[in-house]
Image (tube, helix red, strand yellow):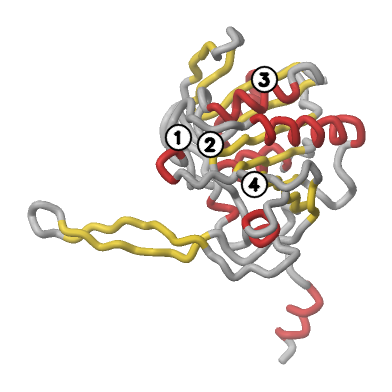
């Protein structure tokens, strides 16, 4: 069996190394990810410049591949250049910082990489870990975060997916691990509304011209049963089934157009 492992934090990130260690005795692994931090890039694909792939030596001496592009680029190169056949599993993460809610989920590079793999029928897991240290969320390379619990949960889930695949109608799983978990079980939840409430900060450059920083404050209004509440309030490891098909209610639209 084979697993393709990618992320949006960079090929030398601590979280992707934890993913490799979680499954390396279950299957052969290919670690291929962006060369640098790509958080917030979503499902973007590079079309107007060439991609280069560089070998990187991980701290256990194994080889990984850094791509000068996006997470989606990395997955595409892995599937269509590095592997001879479709892998049995794809993993994106472990991301530094959670990826929850409906509003920002598709801006996540972690989920973007997972969506690309899942679009080819590969059972896929996107996994992220909550962190409260904002200064490490956008770092490239190793960070001082303990991923051991998330690694254990990923291994548990990967064993199930490698054995059974995913249920019909589910394309990928979005997993979020709390910083201080209350147990080692998965809580199956729906998507909440948001990760953040957008904050736009206006500043002036030395010549007096305005520029802007996009940021956000944590969204705190999710209800019980949502990924946001169960992760942040109940401190449970959440798992949400996702579908790529975004098609809405066809009958409802036909009825609407008749009015």
Query: Which residue corresponds to mark 2?
Result: 8
Query: Pointers 2 and 1 in contact (CB under 8 A)?
Result: yes
Where is residue 82, by image quadrant? top right
Going 63% across and 61% down the picture, which residue do you hit? 102
Mark 3 vs mark 4: in front? 4
Considering only order in the chain, which callout, 4 or 3, is on the residue closer to the N terminus?
Answer: 3
Residue furthest to the bottom: 259
Q: Is residue 12 above or below residue 37?
A: above
190 left or right, relative to 60:
right
Query: Pointers 4 and 2 in contact (CB under 8 A)?
Result: no
Where is residue 27, by image quadrant? top right
Residue furthest to the left: 207
Tell me the number on the disc at residue 150.
none
Of 183 and 4, nearer the camera is: 183
Q: Residues within 10 Å of mark 2 (few under 14, many from 20)?
A: many
Tell me the number on the disc at residue 30.
3
Tell me the number on the disc at residue 178.
4
Using the numbered discs, state the Cα–Cα distance from disc 2 to disc 1 in whole angstroms. 6 Å
Looking at the rendered structure, the secondary structure element under dot 3 is strand
Res 79 seen here: no
Mark 4 vs mark 2: in front? 4
Provide residue 26's location: percent of width, then percent of height: 81, 20
Q: Residues within 10 Å of mark 1 (few under 14, many from 20)?
A: many
Query: Which residue corresponds to mark 1?
Result: 37
Of 115 and 183, nearer the camera is: 183
Looking at the rendered structure, the secondary structure element under dot 1 is loop
Using the numbered discs, state the Cα–Cα distance from disc 3 to disc 1 in whole angstroms. 19 Å
Going 51% across and 34% down the picture, which residue do you hit? 9
Query: Pointers 2 and 3 in contact (CB under 8 A)?
Result: no
Considering only order in the chain, which callout, 3 or 2, is on the residue closer to the N terminus?
Answer: 2
């Amino acid at each position: 069996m084979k697993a393709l492992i990618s992320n949006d934090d960079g090929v030398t990130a601590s979280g992707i190394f934890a993913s490799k260690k979680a499954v390396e005795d279950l299957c052969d692994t290919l670690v291929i990810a962006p060369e640098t931090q790509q958080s917030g890039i979503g499902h973007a694909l590079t079309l107007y410049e060439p991609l280069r792939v560089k070998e990187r030596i991980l701290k256990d001496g194994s080889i990984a591949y850094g791509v000068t592009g996006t997470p989606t680029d990395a997955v595409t190169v892995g599937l269509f250049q590095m592997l001879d056949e479709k892998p049995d599993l794809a993993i994106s993460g472990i991301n530094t910082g959670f990826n929850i809610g409906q509003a920002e989920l598709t801006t996540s590079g972690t989920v973007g990489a997972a969506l690309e793999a899942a679009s080819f029928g590969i059972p896929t897991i996107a996994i992220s870990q909550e962190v409260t240290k904002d200064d490490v969320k956008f770092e490239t390379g190793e960070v001082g975060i303990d991923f051991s619990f998330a690694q254990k949960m990923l291994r548990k889930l990967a064993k199930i997916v490698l054995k059974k695949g995913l249920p019909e109608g589910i394309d990928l799983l979005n997993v979020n691990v709390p910083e201080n978990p209350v147990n080692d079980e998965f809580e199956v939840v729906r998507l909440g509304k948001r990760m953040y409430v957008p904050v736009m900060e206006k500043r002036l450059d030395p010549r007096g011209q305005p520029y802007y920083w996009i940021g956000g404050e944590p969204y705190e209004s999710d209800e019980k049963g949502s990924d946001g509440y169960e992760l942040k309030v109940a401190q449970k490891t959440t798992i949400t089934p996702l579908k790529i098909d975004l098609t809405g209610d066809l009958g409802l639209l036909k009825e609407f157009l008749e009015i």
